[in-house]
Amino acid sequence: MTFSNRGNNNFSGGQNYTRRDFNDRGSDRPTMFDAVCAQCGVACKVPFKPNGRKEVFCSKCFENNGGGSRETSFGESRRPQMFRATCDQCGQNCDVPFRPTNGKPVLCSKCFADTKSHFSRSKDRENTRYPVFGKDYSAELEEINTKLDRILKLLVPTTTKEPSKEITTKILAEIETNLEKTPAVAKIKHKKPVVK
């Protein structure tokens, strides 16, 4: 059995999904609802159904409260917090979008731009984060190999000497002589008591 949300059949719940109504999201104008402004008390119409959980404002009060265009409210809410600092290169006071901490260099916008352009125009491969393939790394590799050898020596147990054959034969001979000297113990049979 095939279920479909298209067309007007029994499986679609009696709804026609191919045709849109005037008040659905596809229409040009949203449905307006009656409301009373929480600030000035004027009756107004809003493009959402008020539920009583949030205050509703008329268009004038909404703009006065900073709810104007989307770009303004979006841009203001996304602007990072700025912190006062002193540039490590030029010594001027500046604002930076992060909290200055010890060990992290602080640059003003001018010095930052100069540093950024210096790295982008630099032809010296030493300033890049990519490896330089022409450089000789043999000393570094030798040091790494030495360290790895030390680690392997610590991990691999030292080889133990095999017991010598002389000692083994002596021990076996002693055991045999001790077996010959000890008398064989006969098994004692226990008689079961007879019940009368």
Image: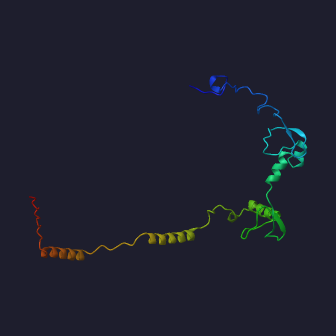
Q: Nearest the camera: 113 or 69?
A: 69
- For the image, the number of numbered tags is 0
What is the quadrant of residue 158 in the picture?
Answer: bottom left
Is 186 drawn above or below residue 27 in the view shown?
below
Rendering quarter of residue 99:
bottom right
**Is residue 39 found left or right of 178 in the rendered image?**
right
Residue ID at (18%, 76%): 174
Residue in the foreground of this view, choosing between 36 and 106 = 36
Determine whether 114 is above or below 143 in the image: above
Percent across and percent down for residue 83 are 80, 64
In the image, what residue occupies the spot 83% across and 47% down?
71
Q: Which is nearer the eye, 118 or 97? A: 97
Q: Position of residue 32 (x, y in %)?
A: 83, 35
Name the image quarter holding the C terminus: bottom left
Determine which quarter of the picture holds residue 108: bottom right
Quarter of the rendering occupied by the N terminus: top right
Q: Which of 157/119 is in front?
A: 157
Q: Is residue 113 left or right of residue 39?
A: left
